[in-house]
Image (tube, rainbow, N blue to C red):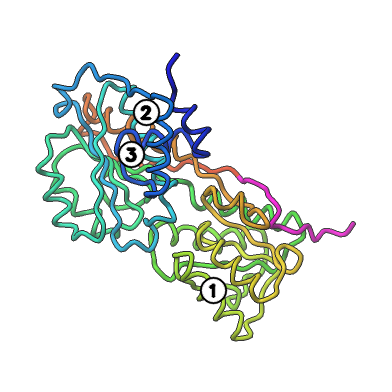
C-alpha cells in the first residue's frame, strides 16, 4: 500500500485536512508548513489519486469564496480554522458528485468579488461570510445562482445560512463558570465588529441575565481581534488600573491568547488570579500555558450542511424559502478556569 494522507500528516505533525489542502494546492496553510508537507510527501513517494472526470469539472463545480474583507478576523491566525471548512466542503462536494474550486480574496472590493464569481462556470457558491456586513452579503444576489453563506448569520436576507450557534455556545461557557462559583464575569469583545462577534456579545449579556448574574459594564473590554492587537489593547487596559473580574469570556481564541500573553506579562496568574475562556478551539489553545477552555465549533458539520443545502437548491428546491441553520458547539474543558466553589 502506498503512502496515505494520514501518514504524511503524522510525520508533519499536522491534521490530515491540512495535508489535503496543501496537496490540492488550496489556500489556508502557512508557507513553512506547505514546504514541509511537500517534502515529506515526496520522500514517502505519495501519488495523488487520478481524477476520472477531469474533462467535465467545470459543469459540475461549486465554488467556495474565501473572503477576507479587512483581515482582522480572517487572517493567518485562522488558517487552520478555514482549512477545516475547506476540507469539509471538499468532502461534502465529493459525496454529491461535485468538484470544489476555491477562490481567495483579500481586501478585494465586493463588486470585484461578485464580478469574478459571475464569470465562473459554476453551479453554485458557498461564501465565507465571517467579515461580510449585511450590505456586503446582499450584493451577492447579483450572482443569480444558488448560494449558501457559512460562518455568519443574517436575518432579513433571502439566502441560506449555516453558522455556529453563538448564543447557545456562550451560554454554555457562562453556565460553566457560574457552576464553578464565578459571579463576577466579564467579556472581552472585538473592537472590529462582525456578525458572529456581535451575536456572542449579545449571547453573553442574555446568558448573564438568564443566570441571574449582575453584568458590570466595567468588565466589558473592547480589544482588537488580532493576536498582537488584543495583546496590546489588554496591556493598556491593565496598566490603566482597570479592575478585573474573576473570569473573562473572550469573543474568540485569538483574542483570548493575545489577552493571556498581556495578563501573564502583567504578573497576573491564570487561572489562580483570573480565569479565561476562548471560542473556536484553535490548535493554539491546547499548547499555550495554561491550555485554554474553549468552544469547539463543528466546522465539518457546518461545511457538509452547506453543501447539502446547495445541492438541494440545484436539484429542485431553488425557489423554496430560505433556510437558516445554526449548529451548536461543544465545551472543551482545559486548565484555564479555576473552581471557586467552597471545598
Q: Indicate which disc, 1 or 3, sits on the residue closer to the N terminus.
A: 1
The residue nearer to you, when weighing 203 against 269, is 269
Q: Relative to 312, is 174 above or below? A: below
Q: Residues within 10 Å of mark 1 (few under 14, many from 20)?
A: some
Please give the range of residues in magenta: 331-343
Q: Decide which of tag 3 and tag 2 comes sooner along the chain.
A: 2
Pinpoint residue 81: horizontal percent, then vertical percent.
Answer: 44, 46
Label placed on residue 207: none
**Secondary structure under badge 2?**
helix
- Where, by quadrant of the figure, is residue 226 drawn? bottom left
Residue appearing at x 23%, y 16% in the figure: 52
Q: CA distance from mark 1 to mark 3?
A: 34 Å
**Front: mark 1 or 3:** 1
- The residue that label 3 is drawn on is 323
Taking depth in this image into account, of 36 and 100 the one nearest to the observer is: 36
The residue sitting at 75% across, 59% down in the picture is: 338
Q: How far apart are labels 3 and 2 at the CA level?
A: 21 Å
* Cα gap from disc 1 to disc 2, whole angstroms: 39 Å
Secondary structure under tag 3 reads loop
For this orientation, the residue located farthest to the bottom is 240
Reading the image, the residue beneath label 1 is 221
Total numbered circles: 3
Residue pictured at 49% horizontal, 27% vertical: 7
Name the residue tied to disc 2: 91
In the rendered image, residue 239, in percent from the top left (x then y), is placed at: 60, 84
Residue that extends furthest to the top in the rendered view of this protein: 1
Instruction: Choose the circle earlier in sequence order: 1 or 2.
Output: 2
Looking at the rendered structure, the secondary structure element under dot 1 is strand
Amino acid at each position: 500500500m502506498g503512502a496515505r494522507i494520514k501518514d504524511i500528516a503524522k510525520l508533519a505533525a499536522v491534521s490530515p485536512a491540512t495535508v489535503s489542502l496543501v496537496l490540492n494546492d488550496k489556500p489556508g496553510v502557512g508557507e513553512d508548513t506547505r514546504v514541509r508537507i511537500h517534502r515529506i510527501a515526496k520522500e514517502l513517494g505519495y501519488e495523488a489519486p487520478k481524477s476520472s472526470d477531469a474533462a467535465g469539472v467545470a459543469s459540475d463545480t461549486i465554488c467556495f469564496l474565501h473572503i477576507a474583507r479587512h483581515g482582522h478576523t480572517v487572517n493567518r491566525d485562522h488558517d487552520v480554522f478555514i482549512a477545516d471548512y475547506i476540507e469539509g466542503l471538499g468532502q461534502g462536494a465529493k459525496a454529491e458528485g461535485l468538484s470544489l474550486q476555491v477562490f481567495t480574496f483579500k481586501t478585494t472590493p465586493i463588486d470585484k468579488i461578485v464580478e469574478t464569481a459571475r464569470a465562473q462556470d459554476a453551479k453554485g457558491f458557498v461564501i465565507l461570510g465571517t467579515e461580510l456586513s449585511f450590505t456586503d452579503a446582499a450584493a451577492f444576489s447579483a450572482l443569480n445562482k444558488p448560494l449558501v453563506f457559512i460562518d455568519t448569520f443574517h436575518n432579513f436576507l433571502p439566502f441560506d445560512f449555516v453558522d455556529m450557534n453563538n448564543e447557545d455556545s456562550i451560554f454554555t461557557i457562562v453556565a460553566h463558570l457560574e457552576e464553578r462559583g464565578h459571579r463576577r464575569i466579564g467579556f472581552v469583545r472585538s473592537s472590529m465588529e462582525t456578525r458572529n462577534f456581535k451575536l456572542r456579545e449579545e449571547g453573553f449579556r442574555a446568558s448573564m441575565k438568564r443566570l441571574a448574574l449582575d453584568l458590570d459594564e466595567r468588565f466589558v473590554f473592547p480589544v482588537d481581534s488580532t493576536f498582537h492587537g488584543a495583546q496590546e489593547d489588554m496591556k493598556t487596559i491593565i496598566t490603566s488600573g482597570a479592575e478585573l473580574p474573576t473570569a473573562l469570556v473572550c469573543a474568540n481564541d485569538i483574542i483570548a491568547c493575545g489577552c493571556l500573553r498581556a495578563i501573564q506579562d502583567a504578573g497576573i496568574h491564570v487561572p489562580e488570579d483570573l480565569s479565561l475562556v476562548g471560542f473556536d478551539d484553535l490548535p493554539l489553545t491546547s499548547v499555550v500555558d495554561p491550555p485554554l477552555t474553549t468552544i469547539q465549533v463543528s466546522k465539518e458539520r457546518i461545511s457538509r450542511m452547506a453543501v447539502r443545502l446547495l445541492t438541494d437548491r440545484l436539484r429542485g428546491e431553488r425557489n423554496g424559502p430560505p433556510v437558516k441553520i445554526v449548529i451548536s458547539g461543544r465545551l472543551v474543558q482545559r486548565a484555564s478556569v479555576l473552581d471557586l466553589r467552597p471545598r
